[in-house]
Amino acid sequence: MNNLINIGMQNNLTYRFQKHVHKYWEITYYFEGSGKNITENRDIYFQKGTIVCQPPGMIHEDISETGYKNIYFCVENFALAQPTPLILNDTPNSDFLYILRQLYYEFYYRPTHRLVTNAILNVLQQYMFILANDSAKSNFYVECFKRELVNNLSNCFFNVADALESVPLCKDHFRRLFKADTGTTPVEYLNRIRINYAKELLENSTLSVKNIAQMCGFDDQYYFSRVFKKQTGESPKLWKRDMN
């Protein structure tokens, strides 16, 4: 990475940043809040510690219901160049953010220190190599955990917190990785696939709501109905009636 074009910071809560495009690589670090980065071909969910690297010519915008803050910078060349956005996650100690803030300071408050600025860019580049490598490994664990959730779809004794203990990563860091990949938490992801299965059973079988709840991993029919209504806006019985 070299030739820093620009660097900026959104230090006030931002709820929407309109569609825009750059002819350079744009690397954005979200250090507060959460939201969604919308590109031409995918939605990227971000939260504290997410790093989104947008390639040149990619139209994108940010939307957040609760607000977010970020630091962004544009570079002419990018060592991890690829045709699609690259999503990374900072270390649990926010090491990348610490160095990035130093880059911001040097760029604006010591403009004559370009050798220092370039040196910091080189350090950031090395960190991004490390984070990209860690991300590839972490995505493996996310995929494995998603498969475990699917495999336990009907298991009412399955406990997500207990299952997380088997993941060889910091739990908070893994939850951030999981949400960046799926847009939701592990518990919400499990409930989502369970309710999707329940909808299929309601539509294509004559089973009772109680039996369907049990087949979808809920030992409490009434809790199942609450989760179902939260996701669909209707009770299981009303949803079945509307489908038939």
Image (cartoon, rainbow, N blue to C red):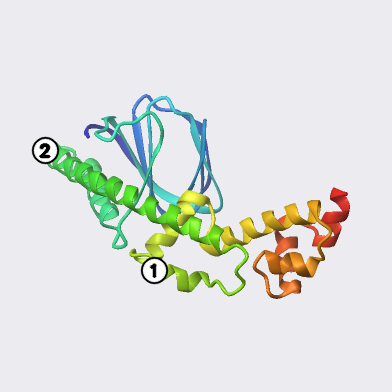
Residue 76: give x, y in percent of width and height: 27, 28
Q: Nearer the viewer, residue 176 or 113?
A: 176
The residue tagged with tag 2: helix, strand or loop? Answer: helix
Q: Horizontal and vertical percent for residue 232?
A: 74, 55
Q: Quadrant of residue 166?
A: bottom left
Instruction: Please tell me whether residue 236 is drawn above or below residue 100 in the rendered image.
Output: below
Given the image, on which type of amino acid does mark 1 rest?
A: Ser
* Nearest-to-viewer mark from 2 and 1: 1
Label 2 sits on what residue type?
A: Leu
Identify the residue at image location x=79%, y=56%.
Answer: 202
The label on residue 115 is: 2
Q: Secondary structure at mark 1?
A: loop
**At x 38% / y 28%, what residue is drawn?**
83
Q: Is residue 162 left or right of residue 112?
A: right
Measured as percent of width and height from the top left, residue 238 is found at: 86, 58
**Residue 163 vertical placement versus 4 (above, below):** below
Which residue ends up furthest to the left in the rendered image? Answer: 115
CA separation in Å, label 2 and label 1? 45 Å
Vertical position of residue 226 compared to residue 105: above or below: below
Q: Which mark is residue 46?
A: none
- Is any part of residue 198 visible from this angle? yes
Look at the image and tell me whether residue 235 can be seen: no
Q: How many marks?
A: 2
Mark 2, other Cα within 10 Å: few <14 / some 14–19 / many ≥20: few
Characterize the local packing of mark 1: few (<14), some (14-19) or many (20 or more) Cα atoms within 10 angstroms.
few
> On the image, numbered disc 1 is attached to which residue?
166
